[in-house]
Amino acid sequence: MKKQGRIAGIGHGIASAALFIVVLLAAVPARAELRIDITNGVSQPMPIALPPFAGGSPQESQTGAAIVHVTSDDLQSSGLFQPIDPRSFIQNVSANDAQPNFGEWRQINAQALVTGAVRALGDGRLRVEFRLWDVLAQQQLAGFAYTTTPQNWRRIAHIIADEIYKRITGEDGYFDTRIVYIAESGPAAHRIKRLAIMDQDGANNHFLTDGRSLVLTPRFSPSAQEITYLSYASGTPRVYLYNIDTGQQESIGDFPGMTFAPRFAPDGNRLILSRSENGNSNLFVLDLRTRRMTRLTDDEAIDTSPCYSPDGSKIVFNSDRGGSQQLYVMDAGGGNVHRISFGSGRYGTPVWSPRGDLIAFTKIDGGQFYIGVMHPDGSGERLLTKDWLVEGPTWAPNGRVLAYFRQTPTDSYGRGGSSRLFSIDLTGYNQRELKTSGDASDPAWSPLLR
Amino acid sequence: MLARLTALAGALLLLAACSSTSQAPATVAPAGPGGVGMSQYAPGSQQDLAATAGDRVFFAFDSSEVSAEGQQILQRQADWLRRYPNVSVTIEGHCDDRGTREYNLALGQRRATAVKNVLVAMGIPASRIQTISYGKERPIVVGDNEEAWAQNRVGITTVQ
């Protein structure tokens, strides 16, 4: 079985490369013995052994060790796996085709084992293969070989982590992804904000704008090749598009008033956004091919932060039409508007889960900010985290993890006010800071890159 | 009279010290009866506007309603703008940071437009008045406390 996926680089000289995947068949068909149920969160992460992938040359071995390191960090960050300290390993796996000595892995309480090998091919490409084993059942659970250019080694590591996650949990992974965000620096009154992008684990950070113009609220296109965001570059706040392959930035057009709060429709051909008209903010859809805008709401209220359901049939947004900022759902054409948030406080920044089953939001109540989720009909509200200021949830593509930003208060001397990215499981467990080079806000998680 | 001026100067200094990050002196409006007075600053300048009319109006939490006090300040701004017919202004709408980013962009725009609409109703041509929202992005006074938030819920008239 072969499947071909395209790996895109960040523009500016990193070439795109094809990735070839081969399934390595197990000698004995695997039964799903090893399994994590992630619905309710786990108190005991699964012990997993990840010995360095074997290599024939020092360079191959070095790459093999580096790949395993990245894969191991991915799995650990999920909170579902506990990679076993390599110093406790009894055997080193070198001949990865042979059956592992399961008894020795059982002795160090490994439930899962990952073996692999790295080979440099004659044409300069890299072949990386890995196998996932159920130590107790002594079975292969998964096996794949990837052929790609050497500079893609990190992506291979993330793809392997995704395969392991999928095989063990039954859900898609989220490691072969990027996060676009706003990098912040400078004093609060004159904050410098730059569009930035990084791998989900903080590697390969790039700044996409130079900080001369204030930029806010970036979001990925469904293909992960484009970003839409707000920029003050022209003096008036306007919605822009950034092409990741070419590095090109363009305004969506010189529409009267401020355009803001953009998000892509699931088909990638349209944006939904807010436009202010004589002080009122209404919702519009912009067709990216014709650059024509269609009005969806027309009222005196603030209608903003719109987001499509994954099937494109509905839109969730926040509005103060009822007196305070609350969440509303309507049909994609603008009809059948109904309020869904009825708890105490104000609700904003609704984002529909990629699975369609939940809407994440920011809630402000009693001087505190919360990140929470509710069903699209407004039922089952659950608050995941609370702080002085937490805002702007974004879903990992599997709908199991959320990222958001957290800002600390500033005193009157300007001290404090740091802003960082965090992730948290839908269960409310496993809250972690995402690595960024400095202050950061407005994260948006990409779809899986394949 | 001298005592009153001294008190005003003291208040000006105090406010300037509190809001060291703002570009213009904060609101102190020694308006004489029948219109705006003169200031020590260059006629038609931002400092002149701030000193003679007051360059900003404040808003209640999550509100874009111009208060009675705001109306008085804007009446003086309109008088001042009539005195300098070649001056154009941009109204900046700002918010405190206790709201979400996009909602605050919309709220800041609503505040800026509310200020503009009052000035237009007072006879200033709309073509002389631009608006821009900074939401919670450019706080005038740094600090997460009630006093700073109150200063940041503001529409500032800036001379172009």
Image: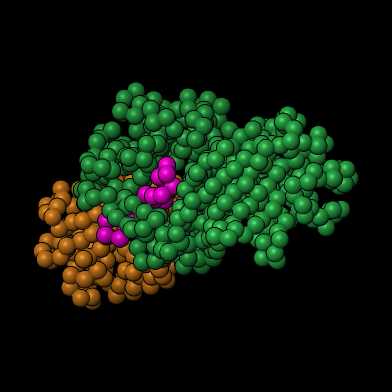
Is residue A52 located in the magenta-colored stretch of the structure? no
Nearest the viewer among A365 and A247 is A247
Is residue A215 located in the magenta-colored stretch of the structure? yes
Nearest the viewer among A42 and A57 is A57
Instruction: Give the letter of the green chain.
Output: A
User: Residue at the spot x=51%, y=61% of the render?
Assistant: A205
Nearest the viewer among B75 and A159 is A159
Residue A367 visible in rendering = no
Residue A396 visible in rendering = yes
Position of A31 relative to B1 (above/below): above
User: On the rendered structure, is A231 left or right of A168?
Assistant: left
Q: What span is in magenta?
A: A214-236
Position of residue A285 measured from the top left corner of the image (x, y, whole percent)? 29, 38
Nearest the viewer among B92 and A90 is A90
User: On the rendered structure, is B102 left or right of B47?
Assistant: right
Count the labels in the image: 0
Position of residue A237 measured from the top left corner of the image (x, y, whole percent)? 30, 54
User: On the rendered structure, is A341 left or right of A297?
Assistant: right
Instruction: Give the letter of the orange chain.
Output: B
User: Residue at the spot x=25%, y=35% of the render?
Assistant: A295
Position of residue A391 measured from the top left corner of the image (x, y, whole percent)? 50, 47
User: Residue at the spot x=24%, y=39% of the render?
Assistant: A293
What's the coloring here?
Answer: by chain
Residue that lies at the very extreme toward the front in this rendered image: A122
Position of residue A437 measured from the top left corner of the image (x, y, whole percent)? 55, 63
User: Residue at the spot x=81%, y=34% of the render?
Assistant: A137
- The quarter of the image holding the N terminus of chain A is top right
